[in-house]
Amino acid sequence: MTHTINRECVGCVLCVHYCPVDAIRGEKKKLHTIDPVICIDCGVCGRVCAFKAVEDGAGNLVAREKPTEWARPVFDYQICVACNLCNMICPTGVIGAQHPDGHKRLEILPYLQESKGCIGCAFCESICPTGAIEMLKMVKNIQ
Amino acid sequence: MPQCGALPGVKLELMKPSLHAICGKILWVDLASGTFTTEHVPSQVYETYGAGLGLAAYYLYRDIPTHAEALGPDNILAFTSGILTGTTSMLTGRWTVAAKSPLTNTWGDANCGGNLAPAIKQCGFDGIFFKGISPHPVYLKLTHNKAELLDAADLWGKDTVETENTLLQPYGDKPVSVACIGTSGEKLSLISGISNDFGRMAARSGLGAVMGSKNLKALVLLGSYPILASDPQKMKELSVHCVRHTEFQPKFLNGTGTRILSTFLRKIPVQMRQDGILYKIFIKKYGTIALNQYSIETGDSPIRNWSGSNLDFPPQRSESVNPDRLAKLEKAKYHCYACPVGCGGYTSIPGNAESHKPEYESVIALGPLLMNNDLETILIANDKLNRAGMDTISAGGTIAFAMECFEKGLLTLADTEGLDLSWGNDSSILILIDRMINRQGIGNLLADGSYQAAQRIGKNSIQYAIHSGGQELPMHDGRNDPGYSLHYAVEPTPGRHTIGSYQYYELYQLWRKVPDLPRIKSLFYSKRSKYHNPREKAEWAVACSQFVSLLNAAGGCIFGAMMGIHRYPIFEWLNAATGWQKTAQEYMQMGARIQSLKQAFNVREGIPLRHTINPRATGHPPLNQGANRNTFVDLDALVPLYWQMMGWDPQTGQPPAPEMLSEGDLHDSHH
């Protein structure tokens, strides 16, 4: 089962804008639906919904989180093998590859090139074969 | 005729990932009318032929009419992606391009790493098939729900690197994949290939000319759809297992060490069975150039257009291509998608530019094969050929042919417009490459490869064209490992080194997973034994052909497979990705069906099924000095045994009728 939208939906189309694979159908002020064939279960629709209208595959409500508080990938370049799987699986295409500054390695390694575009789905963390990616929440006001 | 450039984009049906790992559909692009069709692929096709090479073989056999002109509208150019590509498996990021080859008039395919393979599937297709000829230059822009053919007039005439830079410019840092041809593909050079990632080439079989003949300059793929596996947990477990082996990287080996080791191995009368992990250590540290001096010393590299031996190119001379020298120039490592090994690299070349690190094949084809030991020339020539989109192996082989013709007086200074083509003349090599790329003067004669040039020169110059079925032989000498010669002669795509040899069979270690295959038990064996017992050797070759056909259907990389099948669990990955429950033997049968289908394509074309190989390359007459002295390959004994064990007619090489492709299925609505 993929994510679904319940009757609480007011039709604000916010989830439609955020969905990285265009799986959500719906017009303004009308109940939205998720195409289960296209949905990839990233859960971003639930994280942006202010009306508790999105349920995950198990039927639990997905809690709302502010986009600024979403966990984002942090890369450990000591153990990354530069296989680029994270780069490929990222549904929003915000993981790029470049030569990291101040690092002795010759490999071109992945990095989060646009943290605003990241939807916090953690697909990169789950796919990494060496555990080099950890999803961390940004902490404000670090002294 | 509608102007393709002005066509509005066509909305495509969204991907339906009801099948795991595979997309379930392919895209047909009719370049003549600028129209797009989506075709659903029956799941039985995947179960019979897999994806990647198998899918291309199925549709090309079905839809290319018999005796179609290779550079005409009836030929079909297929870009396909393997079953495992885009799932979380390791070393499985290779894309296949296939068409009828204009160089050999046989089945033609080539494959390449980089980042294009997952991009095809991320657009929702297992393959993109082009037919017809566009009335003017175009390129395809594809996302997961929209396809467009856009005008490529501004791109025509640009090299592969310029083309890619121009096409990527609007997208900034977004991951976008591009495949394109260079100027030699546009000029229909029969030894041109297709490039991705700024000059990494699917070079062989002359498929760049097919793309050029269709007026198709490039593909720009922007899909970002994730590919789902049936059992993601198992996939990751297997990948972790594979990555663990690739991380084992002791530091004691260096370039000089490879040379000393190889001289020692040449002098002893026995040969050591190789284990892939050693090979992996070399490849990860240096790339394929690790083998430069090793191969020259052990007799694996052809010297002086296959007429010389390692004694003509001794270590003092080959020191210029020592892997350590090239490694010093390396600015960054280059990994294909899903690869923890990373054999590629970006190298600084003279003129303050950067280019892909040359491969072993390119170094030998532009170096010892021409008696050239100037590293700068090799680097510049490699970059020129990558930019023009020309195959370095065929270009090197063709220049070697021209040099021998020059030596023997079949080409004179008047023919070459004053160019001195004596052996090892490095400045002439660069000028000749420029002329071949631009098809000027003597370059026009040589731009279609040595076989075509020999036909035009006449005077029995064909004896100096070292080819198989019209394609220049790669830089692995069959006199040293007769397995190469056998594959050069019997593969449906002639003259390929990426399928099998006796050493490859040792490295794959298929017997660990496929019961009944002979196990090589002893660590050392006599070098002479390589030339005996053809029955056993044919069995090894059949296993290699079947396995590599499957590997190409899965999108796998041969360097992964060379680590050994127990470290590179491809059969287990295939089951976990697709949800199938097939045994290793059933997968080998899938490979066999692909191989038979390619052979059936050649049968239908009516070409000789045992390709003509220049006798010099098989040791007729044998060399009288060096590592390969007095060795020759008895193809007359090996070929019928190979055909028999493949399940083909031992006398004629005729395969059984292909499955799912009866008369009624052929030439349907697509024609």
Image (cartoon, rainbow, N blue to C red):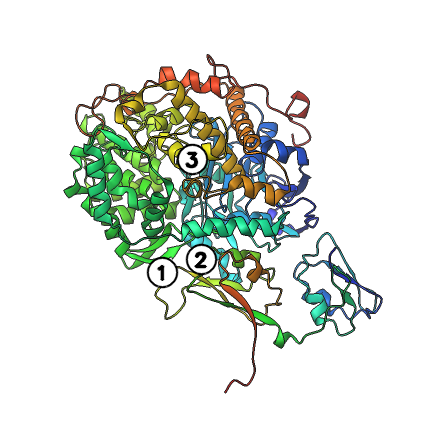
How packed mark 3 is, by other alpha carbons closer than 10 Å (few <14, some 14-19, many 20 or more), is many
Tell me, yes or no, whether the two marked residues, 3 and 2, touch with CB atoms within 8 Å: no
How many numbered markers are drawn?
3
B355 and B455: which is toward the camera: B355
**Amino acid type of the residue tagged 1 in the rendering:** Leu
Q: Please, which chain is the residue tagged with disc 2 on?
A: A
Q: Secondary structure at mark 3?
A: loop
Mark 3 or 1: the one toward you: 3
Tell me how far mark 3 sits from mark 2, CA to CA.
27 Å
Q: Which residue is mark 2?
A: A82
How far across and how far down the image is residue B622, in percent?
23, 21
Q: Please, which chain is the residue tagged with disc 1 on?
A: A
Q: Which residue is mark 1?
A: A106
Q: Which residue is mark 3?
A: B509
Q: Secondary structure at mark 1?
A: loop
How far across and how far down the image is residue A10, in percent?
82, 71
Mark 3 or 2: the one toward you: 3
Q: Is residue B603 visible?
A: yes
User: Image height check: is B115 above or below B566?
Assistant: below
Q: Secondary structure at mark 2?
A: loop
**Amino acid type of the residue tagged 3 in the rendering:** Gln
State left or right for residue B43 relative to residue B60.
right
Disc on res. A78: none
How far across and how far down the image is residue A108, in percent?
41, 60
B107 and B156: which is toward the camera: B107
Residue appearing at x 54%, y 20% in the figure: B604
Q: Is residue B76 visible?
A: no
User: Image height check: is B150 above or below A13?
Assistant: above
User: Image height check: is B60 above or below B177?
Assistant: above
Residue appearing at x 38%, y 52% in the figure: B248
